[in-house]
Amino acid sequence: KKTPIIAFTSLDHETFLKETQVIIGKEFNGYLNKSVPGNMLYRSITKWMTPSEDELLYLGKKEDYLKILQGKKIILADDQDLNLMVTKRKLESTGLEVVTAKDGKELIDLYKATLDENGKSNIDLIATDINMPPHNGDEAVKEIRVIESNNKIRYRNQTPIIALSGNGEKEDINHFFKCGINDYFIKGSDPELMIKIIANYLANKGENGTNLYVNNDNDQIPE
């Protein structure tokens, strides 16, 4: 129970769950497709080693990962006005387009407003605080994942979600992942690390928001 186990398979996420009847978060802590690019493979491993000292050096130089962020749209949610203002300013300085929410309900409403006729969001990533009573970030994430499932958005095309939390305990981080959160940033850490984590999840997205590293037949697409 103390050793994280990640499924590493050629099966896409939906087929893997259907054919094995496993529950991510119970039998396995995480899932990886075998065509996953290097940066996602490395981060998927290191994010379970809490407290993590991963500096995401595999993203390259700063000018390289900043190029990834140009023009990308994200939702930033935080119930503390000062945190929201400072974080928004920092993220916008990298070239990101940032819209803000002050609680989980507003986050869900903003997300719904970005959906097209096929139920696909034009938001590239969500970064959310967790403790935002009365509607916390983790509960909002669960609702967003249900919306994606109802709209038949496949796992590889789900919106990446980063938790912004002051809690870095292993139990808290495991809870984030079980809620459908992809990664986390501990508040008070180097803000450059937050930018790298965001860039890591946007590095493999095409212009339409689809992940480039896997297609419907699970064939690897050359990098």
Image (cartoon, helix red, strand yellow):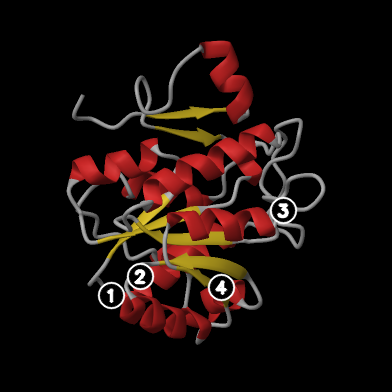
Q: Residues within 10 Å of mark 2 (few under 14, many from 20)?
A: some
Q: CA distance from mark 2 to mark 3?
A: 29 Å
Residue extending furthest toward the front: 134
Q: Residue at x 63, y 34 (%)?
A: 149
Examine the rendered structure and indicate whether residue 75 appears above or below residue 218: below
Q: CA distance from mark 2 to mark 4?
A: 20 Å
Q: Which residue is label 3 attached to?
A: 115
Residue 10 drawn at (x, y percent)? 60, 27
SS type, badge 3? loop
Can you tell which quarter of the image residue 16 is in?
top right
Q: What amino acid does circle 3 point to?
A: Leu
Q: Residues within 10 Å of mark 4 (few under 14, many from 20)?
A: some
SS type, badge 1? loop
Q: Which residue is label 4 attached to?
A: 99
The first of marks 4 and 3 along the sequence is: 4
The first of marks 3 and 1 along the sequence is: 3
Residue 33 drawn at (x, y percent)? 56, 35
Whether the residues at callouts 1 and 2 have beta carbons within 8 Å, the answer is yes
Q: CA distance from mark 4 to mark 1?
A: 22 Å
Q: CA distance from mark 3 to mark 1?
A: 33 Å
Q: Which mark is residue 190?
A: 1
